[in-house]
Amino acid sequence: MTSSGPEQATGGPPGRRTRGPVLGRLALADRAVIAGTLLYLLCALVPWYRVAAFDLGRGYSFPGASVNGFDSGLVVLAFVLLLLATAWAVLPAVADVPVRFPRSLVTVGLATAAFLLTLIEWLSDLDIGFSLMGLLALLAAVTVLTGAVLRLLPELRRTAPPAAESAPPDPSAPRAGAEVPPEAPASDDPEPPDDSPYRGPPPTLPPAGAAGDAAR
């Protein structure tokens, strides 16, 4: 038996499509944020450096110890910030939460703060010795920050105001390179000549004899 329309998922409400897995709805930049956070967690759990045991004298000795990233408060705070950045990046794949600004601005801000905290901790540990795990944790924070920036760029392009449309050219304006006709010279006569066909005859002067009799 053939169906006359598109099939619907069993058990789901009619007219509503089922959503795929969360990971499939994430962009590649969001996946980089998740991967960077997991790598940061792994690097923070591994010992960053070891302190060898030494004898203090008079029966006192200092036992050897290993220090990992979570022994530092800065690394703990940085990891919490990365967790918040990851949760904010994954949130659109789980629920629709509209905001009035580019979403990835929050992710970039949190990742930047985590990167700076990790950088400060790694540089301060150089007095004890070079820590490879600290460097890897710093690179993991850079990965999260890079993914957040790559996610932010298309959002900024979508929210940018469109460029103002240029006004259509004026057909009466002279074109570039076209010769402008010279203007006619101004006339000395203050009154323009009357070319009307209904004008009367020009005025005539009286004869010279009539003008002399009128003067007497």
Image (tube, rainbow, N blue to C red):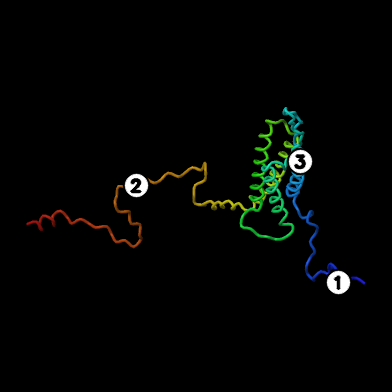
Foreground of the two, 108 or 1: 108
Residue beneath disc 2 = 186
Residue 124, horizontal then vertical, whole percent = 66, 34
* Residue 58 figure quarter: top right
133 in relation to 157, above or below: above
- Against 51, residue 114 (above or below) is below
Mark 3 / mark 2, whichever is N-terminal: 3
Q: Amino acid at mark 1?
A: Ser
Judge whether 131 appears above or below 32 on screen. Answer: above
Q: Amino acid at mark 3?
A: Cys
How far separated are the C-alphas under marks 3 and 2?
90 Å
On-image quarter of the C terminus: bottom left
Q: Earlier in the sequence, mark 3 or mark 1?
A: 1
State the mark number for residue 4.
Answer: 1
Q: Secondary structure at mark 2?
A: loop
Q: Quadrant of the N terminus?
A: bottom right
Residue 205 drawn above or below residue 147: below
Q: Earlier in the sequence, mark 2 or mark 1?
A: 1
Are discs 3 and 2 less than 8 Å apart at CB? no
Judging depth in this view, the residue of 134 and 35 nearest the camera is 134
Residue underneath mark 3: 43
In terms of depth relative to the viewer, which is nearer, 183 or 14?
14
Q: Badge 2 local density, few (<14 within 10 Å), some, or many (20+)? A: few
Disc 3 crowd rating (10 Å Cα; few below 14, some 14-19, many 20+) is many
